[in-house]
Structures are given as structure tokens and as C-alpha cells.
Amino acid sequence: MAVDELQAIIQRCQILEEADFKGEDFNLFQVAGQKCLEDGYAAQLLEVIQNEKNKVIIKNMGWNLISPLVRCIFMYEQEDDKREHCLRILDQLAQLCNPKELFLGLLEQIEQTSGEQVCQTVMLLLQPLQTVLLKLQNKKAYSVGLSLAMIMNQLTPLPVPYTKQQIQEDKLGLCQCCNAVVDFAKPFVNEVVKNMEKSSEYNDMELKEELIKFCMKSLKYPLLTAQLEQLESIEEHPFRHFATEIIDILWNIRELIPLVFVPHKGRSPPWENQEFADIERKNSADSLACLSYLMFVQHFGVECFPMVFSPSYLLLCNMTHIEVLLKRTEESVLSKGLDLFESCLLRIEDNSLLHHYLEFRVFINVPQDLVKIMTLCPMEHMRKKSLNILQLFIDKFDTEGKYTLFRCLLKTSNHAGVEGYIIKNIKDQIHLALTKEYDNIWFTGHHLISLLDLVLSLPEGAETDLLQNSDRIMASLNLLRYLVIKDCESDNQTGVWTTLGKIKQNFLKPLRVGLNMSKAHYEAEIKNKKENRKEAHSSNPVCSVTVSGEKMPAMTTGMQLQVLHSALFTFDLIESVLARVEELIEGKTKAVMDENS
Amino acid sequence: MTTDEATKSEGEVQAAALAERGEDITPSKDRGVLKIIKRPGNEDESPMIGDKVYVHYKGKLASGKKFDSSRHRNEPFIFSLGKGQVIKAWDIGVATMKKGEICYLLCKPEYAYGSAGSAPKIPSNATLFFEASNAGEPVELLDFKGEDLFEDGGIIRRIKRKGEGYSNPNEGATVEIHLEGFCGGRRFDCKDVKFVVGEGEDHDIPIGIDKALEKMQRGEHCILYLSPRYGFGEAGKPKYGIQGNAELVYEVTLKSFEKAKESWEMDTKEKLEQAAVVKEKGTMYFKEGKYLQAVIQYGKIVSWLEMEYGLSEKESKASDSFLLAAFLNLAMCYLKLREYAKAVECCDKALGLDQDNEKGLYRRGEARLLMNEFELAKCDFQKVLEVNPQNKAAKSQISVCQKKTKEHNERDRRIYANMFTKFAERDAKEAASKTGMEKTAEKAACGKGAETPGAE
């Protein structure tokens, strides 16, 4: 019987000195112990372990039982007595065994678990692991770091619950587990804090570095992808709780403010190799962005935050974080980027952001990222939100800043809708310039003319695809119409009358030619279609269209005709505005000529 | 007076006193920032613009509610003066303080967070009061020092006269400056000069001045302290009688500048024309051994052309050939500057354009060898031989790789021999790898003579 075998080996070893234990004894002990557990004699095993006489044996050999023990614990039901016994064995082993070996044994268990069992295993072993680490004499910081890194690495592949329901359900136990890991880390945080209080030149840099690494890792996973907005009817939002704890740790070890404000200096041990430093920087970029989100959007840790920074400087500091977040496509990350951007912009007064900020590359890059989201993101609310934020961004700049930004966006967006939107903004600025008293040199006179050159032109002359560019063309025509109505030739505040010849040459004329060509083309096409319809119904589609993997049904001739007609309608619309503009120009120039003659 | 209430009432009294008797320190005299000195400073010197200042403070709202205190963080608050990093009231207020001075400041919203406020602590249109509570917790100016421009101690700036606006010359901008150079108290240079930022070397101006100019504003007058790396380096400057590794001090006035166009302001034709010009310029610097300057020139080609879309076939061909040359030459420069990771990155990009490029492969091999990535380096040299079997240098590099790999493997085997002893040997390993790196660097320096193809 298993228990007898165990007793036998125990009795043999009781008389031996610690140094005399042989490899064979270890094996026999492990096999017998494992058998006891498997055969359901946990209670007896517990007795053996608790026996004072066996202390030395357990101290040396006990760690061998960790693996079978963990397996058994998962085998039994929650309320089973045997499970209770197993848990007490685990507890005893943590007290009695050699810390060094037990540490490796526990770590090995965590390393080997995977999939759905990860969180359960981690939560089961955290307590004994903590006990052992607190007893370790040497390499403690390193071991704490190793444990935290191993645990976080095991958790990382798990999906982060996102919806309220998923969070409440917490199917894999991730929410619970994360908070357990923080509790696990707390004694070590306290240790660092205590040492820091003792002397300002504490020698505990190593443990501190390990804790920073853990916090950085936690910010990247799970916090970056977690839902962190307050949820109704969840009192203690597990990830918000986790985030608070992580920020607390950073604050307590006095690393919070340096991380938020001087992130690139002297953080990690200086790498000899530049490449490592680059990797490290890339890795920490996500974490730091998440940290900023927590502070500035969710206001975690805000009570420690210096309240004398200027809002534009805060925006500048956050721009790189925003850029990192907006480059991502996951909703959870992208929305954090948009929220962070919005919150920074809302602190700034309208028209107060100096145009010089546009000299920072990131101030040019980020609006371009917004444009990408606006035009390519599949989620409608994200597209809308990024459009709103782009407008907010524009509003904050001084006039020269707006001017530069418009120029840049017109040149880089490659999207007629966005260009149309920018042109509408230009019109609004001109309107302000003409109605306000103070001088606005950027939206009148020669600066404006150079901007109008960009706006009032067709990218490919008469061959431009008018349908594709209709948004832009309509906005340009509206702007021109506004200019010739609002600004009389005698005032010529905007300078539009000076450059009229060029506008006619580069814009109105080719547009007229293009319209005529396009209309003729589409009308011919409609005629064709109608005739074909009479001929045969065996309309083989010319090509097929697939949208996200699904093949779209071929268009019927009727649908094709509808599309062609709606194109014609657009052309008519453009033409009517064009005609109005031409009429206005002619009328006004004529009036002036009459006066002069 | 230690109870909270006493503190509060004292605070109110102070705020009232400030409003009544405070000195208006705003330039426009609109009473937006009022100041009372509680304790004068112990030195007469005030901080200069751009200086790094160390301040202790405590801030309250009009309601008496404390919103911030540096004491709470257990460390002084540090910022760069006059750069718009802090609310306007502070840039104005702290600039008037002397070292060791303690004062009170009352700040109108227009000089603080305005109508927008700053969520969640500062409401809209809030007047802020920075004050003393018990003893010694007001705005106290502890210390200040010159601005470290690149956070590496290489260039320290102290601004004598602030420039206008915030606009800086960019790389490639044409600047007109007056400069005086000093070394060990001796003036060795004094001139008015007009040049292109990044090309100061043509006028015997060290790279540090080019770099610093990018952070200066029109009309600014400042003193720059350059370490040798940003000065004339190891070689010194015999023309001025300057020895190697000399520290330099320059006084520079930026009289005017015209910015170079940003990439998005240029059209493709212009970019291609300019690319030819800067390529030649870069090669000239390279041949003179001025690698930092060469990197600037080649870097321009990359910034202009790397992301250029919608090129015609002919343009695209020209663009690719410029880019290829730029990446290959950048790789060479970085090898010379011992920035191997960057060299590899440039080679990767060059090979992205032309995967069988002999120079690209060879230079990546060299860089990897110097980074101790022997296997990868060997692969590169082998590919060189596939492209050109006559390349003798590559052949000899392969045998170097093999030798290094062998040495390295042996060391690894020793280190990873036993899982449990790994713990104990961690320190030993660190020491070992350190000496190992030095050794390889040494060897690399010796074995370099084989073939170093010059710039394109």
C-alpha cells in the first residue's frame, strides 16, 4: 500500500543525517508520496508532513511533491475534504521546504500550465510562492522579477474580457488573477518603500527595477487592451481596480512622475548595445501610452500630478503616445488614443496653440493618422469621433497654424471627402477674416492666394475623375462662389480677383471640359445599356466584386442604369454651381468695366 | 498656527494682501500675475531663459482648496524656464525670482488654465494662488542650471537674450549668425557668417553649433558650452590651434534664417533635383571623414523620397536609385560611427530595394559581425559570394565568422552547462560577455583593412 511504502522510506531516512540523503532516497520519496496522493491518502500524507520528526526530510525532499499535488488539487471537487487536505499540504510545504528548491518547483508548475488552467494554477500557487520568496536569502530581487515575468508571460496569451458581460463572467479568471498578482507583489513594494525611507541612497535598485518591469508589462497587458471606462452596476470594476493598484505601486516607489515626464532618461540599465535600447524603447512605448491614458483620461493618480504644466506642453508630451495608439487597429487601443487626444485638446483654449508646434513631426503625423481612421476604419463611431477630433485639433491652432495644417492635409490626405472638408474649413476661416476687425494675413492676400492655388485646381486637369472627386469639387466651387459674392473686386481683400485668370485657366475651364466629356460618356453608356437590355437578358457580368470575402451579387442592368443616372445627377449639380459662379464673375467684371468706360 | 483652520485663514489673508499690495509683474501690466516676496534670495542672479529651474511650491484655488504641492511628491518640481512648459504666470513669475527667494503669486485665469480649466482639479476660469502655509512652503526657487540641449551633457545653453516667436531653423535652413568661439579663455574665432544648417563644417563651424541652431529662435543670443564630441572632436582644429578633445565655448547670435522646405512642401521634381545636390554634398563630407555631416545630407534623401507616392515610372527609377545610394552610404557612415544597429537597418532598406546588392550585403555582414551576430554575418558574406564569387574580402570575413562562432559557442556551453548553477554564474556571465565584447571590437578594428568600399 502507498502509505506503507511512504512510511518505509521515511523511517529509513529519519535516522540519516541531512548530508547523507542519496539521490535514490529522493526518488523513492517522490514516488511513494505521489502514489499516496493518487490513491487518495492525502490526509495520511499530511500527517507525515506535519510530524516534527520528519522536518529535515520534508525540508530537503518536500518540493518534489509539488507537481503531483497540483495535479490532485485540480482533480478534486471544490468541497471535497481531500482537496482541503491537499491545500494544507501545499501550505505546509511552503513553510517547511528549502526555499531555493521549492521556488524552482513552484515556478516550474507555473511555466508548465497553459490554456484554461493558467489563472487557476497561478492563483493557487501565488501564496506559497510569496511565502518562499520572502524567505529567500540570496537573489531575491532576481527571483521576484523572474516570478512576476513568468506569471505575466503565462497570462499574456489569454483574451482580455472586454464587454460588461465578459468582465462579469470572467470565464478564465483573468480579472481575479490580475488582482491577486498585485497582492502578491505588495510585500515587495513595501520593502522597497521602507528601504527608500531609510536612506535616500537606497541600494535596492534591483528589486525596484523588477517592480517597474512588472508594472510596465501590466500596462501593456492586460490594461492597454482592457475596457477601462466605468461600467454601470459593476461596483468594483476589476481592471480599474488593477490599474489603480499598478499606479499606486509606481507612485509608492516614486517612479510615476519620472515615467510620465522624463520617459527616455536613465530608465533601464544602459544597454551596451544600441539595438537592445531600441527594442526596449519600442516595448515601453505601448506601456507609457497606456499610463498616460490612465492619468489624463481616467484621472488615476491625478492627485500626485503637478498642476502647473501648460496645456500645450501636456499635449506635446502626449503626442507621441497618441501616435502610438492611433497606429493600432484594435478598437480597445484605438479608442484610448482618441480619448487621450481629445482630453489633451479640451484643456487648450481655441486659437491658442502656436503654429510652431507643427514643426514637431508628430504634430503633422497624428492628423494624418486621424485621416486614415476617418477614411479606412470599419467602425463608424470611430470614424465619426476622429473627424470630430480633427476639427477640435484645427480649432486649437492660431491662424498660421490652421493655414499650415490645411496645406499639409490637402497635400497628404488623398481623399476627396477629406479634402472637401478641409476646403469648407478654409471657407470658414476666410469668412472670419473678412468679418472680424483685426488683420488676418493668413486668410487674405498673398498667403491665401497660394492656398487657393491648391484648392482651385483639378488634380489631373480635364481628365480628372469628376465623380470620384465630386466632394472636393463641390466644396471648391462653393468657396469660389462665396469669394466672388463676399469680396468685391474694388476691395479685393482676399486677392481672388487678382488671380482670377489663373483660376479660370486651371480650374473653371478644365472643369467645364471635363463635365462635357463625362456627361457625354455617361449618356452614351445609358443609351447603350438600354439598347442591350432589349437585345438579350443573358447579361454576363464583366467582373465580380467581393466584399470582406463574400461575393456580391452581380448588378442587374436596372441597377447599373440607376448608378449611371445618379452619376449624371452629380454632374448636373456640379454644373449648376459652376454656371452660377461663371455668371457671378462675368456680372461683376462687366459691372466694373461699365463703370470704367 | 498649526491647525488647518489657522492655515486656511492665513491663506485667505495672504490672497487678500496679494490682491491689494502685490506687485504686478506682467509685461502688459494687466495685473494678471501679482507677487509679494516673503524672503529675498541669497544671491543676486536670476535664472535665464531655458535654464532648468528647481522649485518648491504649493497651490490653492480661491476657495482655499489645495490642488497641488511639490512637498507632497517629496521632491522639487523641475522645468525649463520661459519655454511654455508651465502656465504663463509661472514663466513670468519664476523668471523674476532669485536663488533662494520665497514668494507668493496670485494668477488670473488668463495666465493659468483659462476658460478650459484643467480636468479634474482646476475648474473653468479659476484664479490660482501659490502660497506659504506653515513655514517655508511657498514658491521657493531652489536652484537652476543651463539647459542641456540633447540630455547628454554635450551642449549646454544659456540664453542671454530670448529670440522672437518659437520658430527654429530646421536642417537645411539658411542662417545668418554672428559667432565668437573661445577655447580655454582664448578667442579663436569671431565672424559674421551665412550658411546652411548641417553644413557649418564648410565654414570651420563645429557640428554642435548646427545642432544648437535648430533649437534657437530669430534674434536669440546665447552661450553654448560644447563637449569635444560636438566640437572639433579627437582631431581638434589646427587652423585655430585647437588640440584634440577640447571643450569649446561659443557665443552665438542668430540674426535671421530662412527655413528649408519640409518634405510635404516639395513636389517630386524638386525632391529629385535636390537629392542629386545633397548626395554630392554628402559624398564630399564622407571623403573628408566628416561622417556626422554626411549622415545629415544622405538622411535628407531618405526623408524626401522614402514615402513619396504616385511617381511616374521614370521618376520612380530615379528615386529608387537615389534611395539605394543613400541607404548604402548611410550604412557606411554608421559603420564608421560605430552605430551598428543603424547600419544594419540601412542595409536592410537598401536590400529591400535591391536584394542582391553586393555592397548592401557586405556592409550588413560587417555590421552584424561587429554586433556579435556571427551566423547572420556569415550568411550575408556567403550571399556576397553568390553575387560575386570574386569578392576576396567576403571570403576572408567568412572565416573570421567561423572562428568567432566557435569561440562563442564554447563560452555559451560553459555558461549554460547546468541549470542550477546558472543562478550563481549570472554575475560571472555578465563579466565574461563584457570582456568578450571589448575583444571583438578590438579585433574588428584590426581586421577592417581588407576592403572598405567608399561612398557611391
Image (spheres, helix red, strand yellow):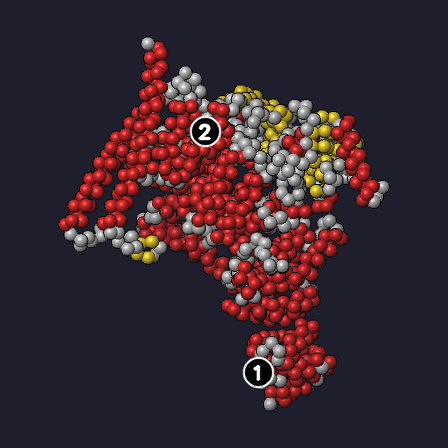
A495 to A256, vertically: above or below: above
> What label sits on residue A109 in the rendered view?
none
Q: Are marks 2 and 1 in contact (CB under 8 Å)?
A: no
What residue type is disc 1 on? Glu
Q: Residue at x 51, y 49 (%)?
A: A335
Q: Chain of mark 1?
A: A
- For disc 1, the marked residue is A38
A437 to B42, vertically: above or below: above
What residue type is disc 2 on? Ala
Residue A568 pos. (x, y %)? 27, 39
Residue B452 pos. (x, y %)? 41, 42
Quick one: A460 or B175, which is closer to the camera?
Answer: A460
| Residue A479 can be seen, yes or no | yes
| Residue B79 can be seen, yes or no | no
Residue A241, quarter of picture? bottom right
- B120 to the left or right of A376: right
- For disc 2, the marked residue is B260
